[in-house]
Image (spheres, rainbow, N blue to C red):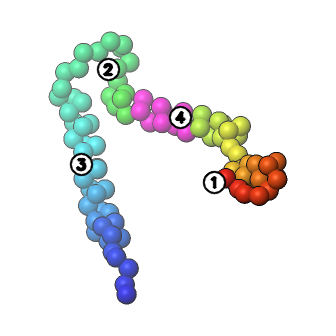
Amino acid sequence: MAEKKHMFDDPKNVRRVLYVLYCCCALLFILDFVIQRHLVHPWERLVGFYAVYGFVGCVVLVLIAKWMRTFLMRDEDYYDREELNVATTDGGDHVEH
């Protein structure tokens, strides 16, 4: 029996989604010149300011997450070891799940 084919298994569908994404980006870039915005800071007048601001914000979030991973990450068997400790401390009759 053949596996079910999903929407993005077909390269044509992937190209269509990318085409729509590129068109939306181009439209938003053009609208940036047409729509009058109420600016608070002078740097908001720069062309593509919000795109650069969003990109830099995402990069900073990824870098902070990579840094946090160094002290938040647990070993692969972290939870299994906890179960073993519970089982050995109450006599090893049963393991709670």
What is the secondary structure assignment of the residue under circle 4?
helix
Mark number displayed over residue 61: 4
Query: Residue placed farthest to the bottom in the image?
Result: 1
Residues at marks 3 and 2 touching, judged by CB atoms closer than 8 Å: no
What is the secondary structure assignment of the residue under circle 1?
loop
User: Range of the magenta residues?
Assistant: 52-62
| Amino acid type, callout 1 | His
Whichever of labels 4 and 1 marks the residue nearer the N terminus, that label is 4
Q: Nearer the viewer, residue 82 or 95?
A: 95
Whichever of labels 2 and 1 marks the residue nearer the N terminus, that label is 2
Give the quadrant of the N terminus.
Answer: bottom left
| Amino acid type, callout 3 | Cys
| Amino acid type, callout 2 | Arg
**CA separation, marks 4 and 1?**
35 Å
Q: Residue at x 32, y 12 (%)?
A: 40
| Amino acid type, callout 4 | Leu
Task: Report the magenta stretch's main SS.
Answer: helix
Q: Nearer the viewer, residue 93 or 64?
A: 93
Mark number displayed over residue 78: none
Instruction: Say which of marks 3 and 1 sits in front.
Output: 1
**CA separation, marks 2 and 1?**
58 Å
What is the secondary structure assignment of the residue under circle 2?
helix
